[in-house]
Amino acid sequence: MPLSRDLVQPRLTGLVELTDEALIRFGSVEPHQVIKAALATADLYGPVLEAERLADQAVLAMSCFALHGDWTPGRLAVGTRYTSYYTVGASMLRDLGYEMWATDTSTDGEPDPTNPVHFDIVIQRDIPFEALADRTGSPAQRRDLRNRFLPELERLLDRLDGPQPLADDEGYDRDPWRLP
Amino acid sequence: MKTITRPVVTTEVNARMLRQGRLTIHEALLDGDENLQVGAKLLVHDGDVTYLSAAVTAHEGDLWELTLQRENE
């Protein structure tokens, strides 16, 4: 059986346009780690790129969620071990020229429960796929490739506020870790 | 002080991965000098405060399947 990979698709209904929502990010904001994750998922965006009429191009994106309606940080972190998060205003990012794409992810046909408020902040687009070949090259090639995109990524990461601790009073079970 | 001797891979660890005890990572998440192979042990860092023990349980092209392990495994 082939190994599981996420499928990323454009979200066409529900919350697809951001106004002044805050965007929230869990996990690492260390630039090399964020760019590694973006490079690792660059080939998952085929359906999104087709919708954006960017087929045959790669995109580097950073995953985040919109704090919208009853989607609180605690609810978004249900079932994880995250203890803190970072935020950034969608309107500020838009003013700075960043695109934010509403995307749904699924794995083995199972949609992620946080899909209704999932967005990708575009770090860089219009990248020829062949330009990412070194993402699996030698350690030096990988480092050089990451370094090419770091200035643009750091410009984005500088806008994030945090880390802010997740409140313990929202009543969500954040650590129901059960191994099979 | 505890010295970490196993490779560390930092990646999103979402609720599904924790529930299933398994995740797939792409080679691009690695530095390229880890010399991973099936059976290798490593640590999965969620980018926050949690490090999870894991073992490589499958390899296919640029993809590695990691199975999370209980602390004493």
Image (spheres, grey):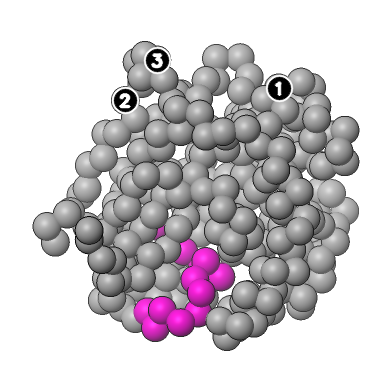
Q: Disc 1 and disc 2: Cα gap in Å? A: 25 Å
* Residue labelled with disc 1: A21
| Relative image position of residue B24 (x, y in whole percent) | 43, 62
Q: Is residue B33 left or right of residue A62?
A: left
- Tell me the residue at 36%/34% (across/down): A79
Type of residue at label 3? Glu
Type of residue at label 2? Asp
First in residue order: circle 1 vs circle 2: 1
Q: Would you identify the image quadrant in which residue A148 lies? A: bottom right
Asked if badge 1 and badge 2 are on a common chain, one would say yes
* Residue labelled with disc 2: A173
- Tell me the residue at 50%/29% (across/down): A164
First in residue order: circle 1 vs circle 3: 1
* Residue labelled with disc 3: A170
Tell me the chain of label 2: A
Q: Disc 1 and disc 3: Cα gap in Å? A: 20 Å
Q: Secondary structure at mark 2?
A: loop
> Does the magenta run of residues contain B29?
yes
| Relative image position of residue A119 (x, y in whole percent) | 67, 38
- Tell me the residue at 82%/71% (across/down): A128
Tell me the chain of label 3: A
Callout 2 touching callout 3 (CB < 8 Å): no
Type of residue at label 1? Glu
Residue most extreme to the front = B1
The N terminus of chain B, quarter of image? bottom left
> Does the magenta run of residues contain A138?
no
The magenta-colored residue range is: B23-36
- Tell me the residue at 69%/74% (across/down): A145
